[in-house]
Image: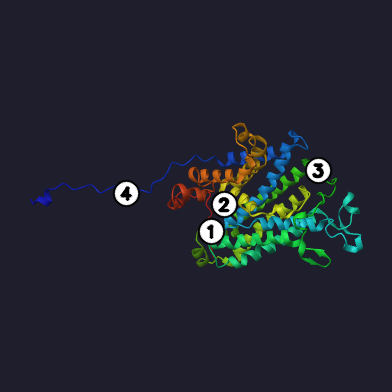
Amino acid sequence: MTGDAAAPRRAPAPVRGPRTRPRAPKLPRRARVGLAAAALLGGAILPLFLASGGGLIEDATLALAYVVMALGLNIIVGFAGLLDLGYVAFFAIGAYTMGYFGSLFHINVNGGEGIHVLVSGVAAELPGIHLNFLLIVVLAIIATTIAGMLIGLPTLRLRGDYIAIVTLAFGEIVGRIAINGDEITGFGTKLTNGRQGITPVDKIDLPFLDPFTALNLRPWYWVAFVMVLLVLFVNFRLRDSRLGRAWIALREDEVAAVSMGVPAVKTKLLAYGTGAAFGGISGAFLGSYLNTVNADQFQFSFSIFILAMVILGGLGSIWGVVVGAIALSFINNYLIPDVLNNVPARIGLDFDLTQLSFGIFGFLLVIMMVLRPEGLIPERRRQLELQEGIEDLAVDGDDVQPAVRP
């Protein structure tokens, strides 16, 4: 026997699969549904345990309005993967729609008699244009949807950072127009009232209910809560629809999605228009709730504030965005100004913590990117991509949407 024949045979090397991290245990579907139902029930009855005109219910109402905006931005950024840094423009358009059609802004209209449609109380006797809040919401949806599609047109051939630059420019243009619009006149009125703002703005006047007041904030909270429920329903239906799967396909690989028959132009424009509509709804509500529409409200920092909510909660995750929006809203409106604002003075420093609020948000985002980049409540697909690799999608695709068919 030769030396080669006498040599022992080596066992074949074992085939190693992809390295994976241990997965967090997933709650059963029944438990998740029960948890969501308990959260919604708790949110509905929360005002009954708070003072009707206190600071906590005021902060909670603002948080719900921000949830609507964050869910709208999540459609653009989280579902379709289109980075939007000018989302404050839709807030501005919705708020000015409320100011135009629910205030004394057009004081000389109809010979000073005013126009009144389905309003009651004091608003029915004032000059200017005064429409019912529900009609104004419809007008805000139409205006912001058109604006969203207009901003989408220049970005159809762009990707990544270039989309962010165009949307940033759009937000800044709308902000500059809001500030300098008092110098633009037409049909006997100004385009905006500049930094003086449009005030007072009509309170919400719903059918079969008394007009809302600034002293009792419970009706405001419940209206905002119903808005959140409606937007959540629309978000879930859109995510599970053919359009939602087309958005996800474009986000994952635009070239592959187009080659499979996804109409990129139509799909992107629908993402911008739908997300903008939610911003307009919230803007109209905030215009009435805050009793003013002022150009100083529409700063670039507000777009970053809403985007931070989406990133903190988890891109593409509906419940994650809700949690992120509520968390950042309470940090900004309650924790920093009311709880932690005096901490620097106690240790001998001469400044208010509110001056560093955006620095605190930036620090939180850095910590999130290091410790939990997928967000507080991540979307299943994104969690698999970041923690285990895209290979596992074929193995564990419980919550992963199937591919789009042409």
* Kind of element beneath mark 1: helix
Q: Nearer the viewer, mark 3 or mark 4?
A: 3
In the rendered structure, are the residues bearing label 3 and label 1 in contact, judged by CB atoms less than 8 Å apart?
no
* Kind of element beneath mark 4: loop
Q: Mark 3 and mark 2: span between their CA atoms?
A: 35 Å
Q: Which residue is mark 2?
A: 316
Q: Which residue is mark 4?
A: 15
Disc nearer the start of the sequence (3/4): 4
Q: Residues within 10 Å of mark 2 (few under 14, many from 20)?
A: many
Q: In the rendered image of this protein, does residue 263 appear above or below residue 302?
A: below
Q: Which residue is mark 1?
A: 251
Q: In the rendered image of this protein, does residue 343 appear above or below residue 178?
A: above
Q: Quadrant of the C terminus?
A: bottom right
Q: Position of residue 168 (x, y in %)?
A: 61, 59
Q: Residues within 10 Å of mark 1 (few under 14, many from 20)?
A: some
Q: Mark 1 and mark 4: span between their CA atoms?
A: 33 Å
Q: Amino acid at mark 4?
A: Val
Q: Quadrant of residue 298?
A: bottom right
Q: Residues within 10 Å of mark 4 (few under 14, many from 20)?
A: few
Task: Identify the residue at image location x=70%, y=60%.
Answer: 144
Disc nearer the start of the sequence (4/2): 4
Disc nearer the start of the sequence (3/1): 3
- Closer-to-camera residue (235/339): 339
Q: Nearer the viewer, mark 3 or mark 1?
A: 3
* Kind of element beneath mark 2: loop
Q: Amino acid at mark 1?
A: Arg
Q: Mark 2 and mark 1: span between their CA atoms?
A: 10 Å
